[in-house]
Image (cartoon, rainbow, N blue to C red):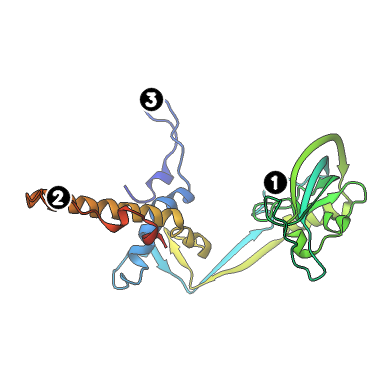
Amino acid sequence: MKGLWKENLGGWNHKDSKRKKQNRKHTLKDNGYYIVTSFDGYKNTNKKVNSEIFRYETETIKTFTGDYYNPKPIVEVVKIYGAVINWREVDEHEEFIKDDTTFSGFKENWREVSIFINENMNFNYWGSERHTYSSITGEPIKKFLDLTDKQMRTMKIVEKRYTGRDYVLPKEMVQKAIERKNKVIVEDFQKEGAFIYGKPLESWKRMTFFNDGKRRKYAQNRANRMDRRNIKAWINKHDISKPLKTHALSKSIAWEIW
């Protein structure tokens, strides 16, 4: 069953067990691909659809505060770790130095340092490396290790262990985090934005409907469907002397995925 009925569930059933409500993320996972391909695909431009299910608006404006992507509370004291950090070495032309003896194929440098991490930052996309500081000098790890921008992109915290000591964040760092958390952001999120079930469909979310997993599932279903069709035809013709042909996708669905 398609629709929003799962988002309206709540309470307990007759067996006294609570049914967890489904949120919008699950609804889009279930229905998003089929709604977009049915009503917004290049093959279905003439198909009419209820505007409550899918529609376009000329402009989508989204208003949120700075803690929208980082709802964690502000902290003033963080842990000090003893960490092992590695990064790739570069030559005088800022090119990585090759070394076939390493796993990565490039020359690497390793160092054990004492660090703390600014936990008031959001690590969803870039990780904590770019928000790592030396607990000895308070400098960013990039400046402390004298790394270039290119080396910084390869820098990784291989392992870390809590030393039992804490570090009090500078007041300036805490104040910036508070200002960033309370900042009101008004964003022109998408021109001619699409709406599904009355809520904006962000462009990045639309792309997840067509990622490798979705294409793989579609390709596998198509290959199985074609094989079943060939088998039925082979049985119905009663010509068992001829070899049974399988569809080309049965050997590799990679052709259909890519």
Task: Give, as a three-letter code, the residue at label 2.
Answer: Lys
Task: Give, as a three-letter code, the residue at label 3.
Answer: Lys
Residue 96 in view here: yes
Please determine whether, in this image, residue 137 is positioned above or below residue 167: below
Among the 4 quarters of the image, the one containing residue 219: bottom left
Q: What distance separates the C-alpha of mark 3 from that of mark 2?
A: 45 Å
**x then y, percent, for residue 68:** 64, 54
Q: Is residue 41 left or right of residue 244?
A: right
Q: Residues within 10 Å of mark 1 (few under 14, many from 20)?
A: few
1 or 3: tag closer to the N-terminus: 3
Marks 3 and 2: which is nearer the front? 2
Instruction: Describe the element under mark 3 as helix, strand or loop.
Output: loop
Among the 4 quarters of the image, the one containing residue 31: bottom left
3 or 2: tag closer to the N-terminus: 3
Instruction: Describe the element under mark 1 as helix, strand or loop.
Output: loop
Q: Which residue is mark 3?
A: 15
Q: Nearer the viewer, residue 143 or 66?
A: 143
Q: What distance separates the C-alpha of mark 1 from that of mark 3?
A: 36 Å
Q: Is residue 237 left or right of residue 53?
A: left
Which residue is at the far front? 101
Q: Is residue 253 left or right of residue 132?
A: left
Q: How many marks?
A: 3
**x then y, percent, for residue 210:** 43, 60
For residue 72, the mark is: 1
Q: Which residue is mark 2?
A: 232
**x then y, percent, for residue 174:** 83, 51
